[in-house]
Amino acid sequence: MSDLLREIDKNDVDISQLFKWSKKVELSDTTSGTTVNFYMRLLGDSDLNRARAHGYRKAADLRKKLKTQDSDERVTLLAELEDFSDKEMLIKSVEILRISEIYQRALKAAEVNEPKEPTGDDQEKWEKYQIAVDEYPKKFRASVDKIADKLRADELKSLEERSTEELYKIYEGEIINKLCQEAMNNGFYDMCIYLSTFKDKDFKYLSFNSFEDYDNIHPHLKEKLREEYQRLEMGIELLKKLPEATE
């Protein structure tokens, strides 16, 4: 929930990061002592669409399995109605699953005006402005928390009025959506990394002969490559912060 702080980040954009669309990635294996070099670049629209399609296929496949009784995925990842000892346990499970959504709604609903820069060179006005800027994240978070508490109370009242069977259907839908969102996100980044990682600095030869080869590498290596790709993506997010991007 880092965005709850909503920092006023004027003049904090590192322009040098905006044009680093590719880079050399050096990864070391502490066990064997070997080092491998990769060359990574951000994907274009066509490959991004390919990665999204892969992510949606993974999510759709998982959703189908989670809705199939006695499938390995459902047995492993989804509790059945008889697994809940009582109605209160179901309510708590739904509450936990919906916390993120409630805070997202609270973020959108919060209205705390950002401090306005003073006109002129009066030092005292600028001092007060800086104090207001420093206090803004705390005020914004307090507003979000207050709204979230109200939304949670309303949600709890609504859930308590439902039957056990209705609550289970809500739980089932929430957890399936959550798991499928994770599957989509992981599938998307897996394909991004496969398509964006090369053996050579001229970006002619992919590091992995096939997606299956990539998919079978050690999870630790996958995690490191994902971190590196997401650092490249940060350049785009920084670019969006520039005033010219919002005009």
Image (cartoon, grey):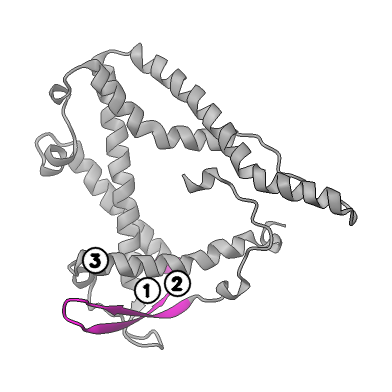
Where residue 123 sits in the image (x, y, percent)?
86, 54
State the SS at label 3: helix
- The numbered mark, 1 or 3, whose residue comes first in the sequence reads 1
Task: Tell me the amino acid under the disc marked 2.
Answer: Leu
Numbered range of the magenta stretch: 22-47
Residue drawn at (59%, 75%) of the image? 16
- The numbered mark, 2 or 3, whose residue comes first in the sequence reads 2
Where residue 223 sits in the image (x, y, percent)?
29, 64
Q: Tell me if label 2 and label 1 are in contact, CB under 8 Å.
A: yes
- In depth, the one of 184 and 29 nearer the eye is 29
User: Does 34 sit above or below residue 215?
Assistant: below
Residue drawn at (51%, 34%) of the image? 105
Point out which mark residue 42 bears.
2
Q: Is residue 27 magenta?
A: yes
On the rendered structure, is 79 left or right of 191?
left
State the SS at label 2: loop
Residue drawn at (34%, 65%) of the image? 226
Say which residue label 1 marks.
196
Where residue 43 sits, quadrant-wise, is: bottom left
- In depth, the one of 9 and 210 nearer the eye is 9
Q: Is residue 90 magenta?
A: no
